[in-house]
Structures are given as structure tokens and as C-alpha cells.
Image (cartoon, grey):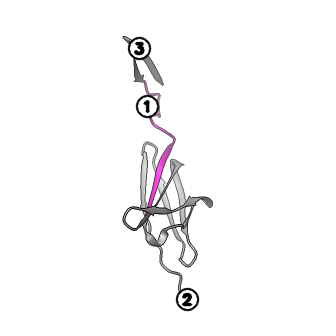
């Protein structure tokens, strides 16, 4: 629970946690996926559902970010001409971010 107390016109937020839930915790975390330039425009699937495409990032790499609920998820990165990359991740409650580095291999002829 959150409480707001006003002291001289300034709001002070206070927190009282309930059993099993930390104050300020969220049911979601941020998944950050990084890859080299081979992943640019690759489509990211989480638990079989398309979440969007990797985008150009920094000095020749690719990046994707999405919010997910804590627990176990299947993450797949697909791009035409490359073998799909599949990872299973488990993120416990309380973690706010999870980083995943992927590498895509060209599909054999």
C-alpha cells in the first residue's frame, strides 16, 4: 500500500508492504534483447506471439525491448535467410530487467 502525506504542501509518499508483495514491485519486467547487425529487422516472438522487430542500435548492433510478466517465457528471433534463435528465460518476481544476447546463424544453402 502507498500512503501520501503532505508536509508543508510537499507530498511525501510512504510505503507499507503487504505479505508477499514488496512495495513498489511490479508484475512486469523489461526484456532487453541485443544482437549484431544480422538481427536488424528480425521479428521477436514471445510465447509464440509476435512482439515487433529488432531495430538498429549503436555501432552496428540491433536492439529490441518489451514488457513481460515475471515467470518463464519462450523468446524466438526470426529473420528470413537465418536459422531461428530460441531461448527459454525465467525471470523471478522482483527483477525489473532481463538482458538477452542472441546470435543468428545464416541458413545453410
- Percent position of residue 72, x then y: 52, 54
The answer to whether 53 is drawn above or below residue 96 in the figure is below
Q: Relative to 104, does residue 68 appear above or below in the rendering? A: above
Q: In which quarter of the image is the C terminus?
A: bottom right
Check residue 74 for magenta coloring.
Answer: no
Q: Which numbered dot is residue 109?
A: 2
Q: What's the CA distance linking mark 3 and mark 2?
A: 68 Å
Secondary element type, mark 1:
loop
Please rate how many residues cluster around mark 1, counting C-alpha atoms within 10 Å: few if below 14, some from 14 to 19, many from 20: few
Mark 3 touches mark 2? (CB < 8 Å)? no
What residue do we see at 47% from left, 49% from top? 30
Q: Which mark is residue 6?
A: 3
Sequence-wise, the earlier of marks 3 and 1 is 3
In the image, residue 37 lies at what x, y percent? 44, 70
Residue sitting nearer the eye, 47 or 43:
43
Q: How far apart are marks 2 and 1 (CA)?
A: 54 Å
Amino acid at each position: 500500500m502507498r500512503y501520501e502525506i503532505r508536509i508543508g504542501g510537499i507530498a511525501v509518499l510512504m510505503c507499507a508492504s503487504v505479505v508477499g508483495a514488496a512495495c513498489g514491485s511490479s508484475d512486469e519486467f523489461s526484456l532487453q534483447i541485443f544482437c549484431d547487425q544480422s538481427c536488424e529487422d528480425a521479428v521477436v516472438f514471445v510465447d509464440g506471439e509476435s512482439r515487433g522487430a529488432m531495430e538498429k542500435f549503436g555501432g552496428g548492433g540491433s536492439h529490441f525491448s518489451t514488457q513481460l510478466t515475471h515467470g518463464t517465457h519462450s523468446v524466438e528471433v526470426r529473420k528470413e535467410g537465418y536459422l531461428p534463435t530460441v531461448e527459454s528465460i525465467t525471470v523471478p518476481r522482483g527483477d525489473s530487467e532481463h538482458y538477452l544476447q542472441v546470435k543468428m546463424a545464416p541458413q545453410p544453402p
